[in-house]
Image (tube, grey):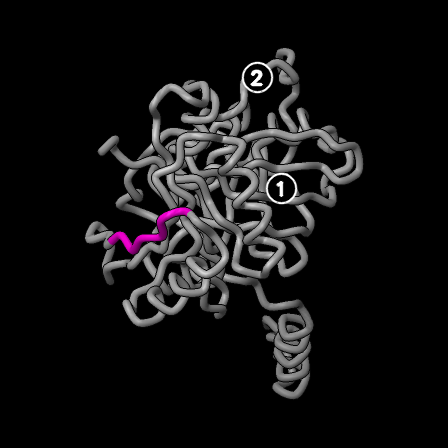
Amino acid sequence: MMIIRKTPIALFGILIGFLLTSCNTNPPQKSASTEPPSRYRQQQDSAPFSYNDLERVPDATPIIEPLSRQGNKSPYEVAGKSYQIMPTSAGYEETGTASWYGKKFHGYLTSNGETYNMFGMSAAHKTLPLPTYLQVTNLDNGRKVVVRVNDRGPFHSERIIDLSYAAAIKLGFADKGTAPIKVEAIDPIAWQWARMKPAGLGNEVYLQVGAFSKYETANQLKKRVQAVTNELVVINLDKAREPNLHKVQIGPLKDMALVQQIKEKLSALGLGKPLIVALPNS
C-alpha cells in the first residue's frame, strides 16, 4: 500500500512567511519614471580628450545684435528659484567666481537656441540679456578675454559665470576649475568705434549717463549733470524698448580726450558710470 506523506500546514505557513520576509528586506527598486533621463549623454562634465592650441582662439568680437528670441523670458525658474533678466547690460560689472563647462554640454543647444561649442569664446550667465558681450579678467594672473553670453547658468550661488572651455584655457584656470574674476559688459557700438575710427575725424559720440522709464527721473539727472559740465546734455527717447527709455546723454562729442575727462569727472562726483554710445552724425 502506498503511503502518502503530507507536509504539515504549519510548516508550509512558516516557509511562506520566511519568503515574504526575505523579499521585504531588499531595498525597493526605483522605477525609471521617478528619475527622468538627462538630455546629456555624460553624467559628469569633463575636459576634451585632445584639442588644438586653444590659447590662439580669437576672442569674441562685439557686434550690434537684437535680443535673442529664446532665453530672455523673465522671470524664469530653476530648481524652485526665480531669476529676473536685467533690462540692459549697460554699466554691468561684477566680481566673483567663474567656472567652465565642457564636453558634457558640447554640441547641445544653449538657452538662446544656438549650439554650444566648448572651443569657442562664449559664456553662461543667470540674468544678463542674451546676447551680451563681456570682458572677463582673471584676478589671479591679470589675463583678459572677451566672450559672448548665449546661455543661462551657472546655478550655483557661489559662481557668477560659466565660461567655455576655450575661455578657461585662455584665462589660465581650466586645470583648477574655478577662478576669481571680474566681468564688465561691453557696449558693441563704443567698442567698434574706439577701434575702427580715430578721434577727430568728424565722428560723433555721446556719453550716456543714465536711462530711465520715467521722464521726470531722467530730467532730474539731466539738471545735475548740466550743472557740472559746459557740454550739451540731452534726453533721447529710445522707443525700441518696452517700456520706452529716456536716455540722459552728453554730446555730441568729437574729442576722445574730452570724453575721457568728462567720464572721470562724473564718476568722481558719483553721477554713475557713463557709457560711450554712437549716434548718427547730425
Place of residue 82 in the rendered image (x, y in percent of width and height, measured from the top left): 45, 68
Mark 2 residue element: loop
In the image, 246: left or right of 117? Answer: left
In this view, 25 is above or below 164: below
Looking at the picture, tell me which residue is in the foreground, 135 or 275.
Answer: 275
Residue 235 part of the magenta segment: yes
Question: Can the viewer see residue 48 in this picture?
Answer: yes
Picture coordinates of residue 214 (x, y %)?
A: 29, 69
Q: Quadrant of residue 18?
A: bottom right
Of badges 2 and 1, nearer the viewer stands 2
Q: Where does residue 210 sit, x and y in percent of width and height?
A: 41, 57
Residue 150 visible in the snapshot: no
Q: Which residue is mark 1?
A: 44
Extent of the magenta region:
231-236
In this view, the residue in front, 257 or 47, is 257
Sequence-first tag of 2 and 1: 1
Task: Give me the residue at 72% from left, 42% from top.
Answer: 178
Tell whether 241 sits left or right of 25. Answer: left
**Amino acid type of the residue tagged 1 in the rendering:** Gln
Q: Residue at (26%, 52%) from the top-left corner?
A: 236
Q: Which residue is mark 2?
A: 57
Q: Is residue 133 left or right of residue 139?
A: left
Q: How many marks?
A: 2
**Which amino acid does the dot numbered 2 rest on?**
Val
Residue 17 at what x, y percent from top left?
64, 81
Report crowding for label 1: few under 14, some 14 to 19, many 20 or more residues within 10 A (C-alpha).
few
- Within the magenta stretch, is there residue 265? no
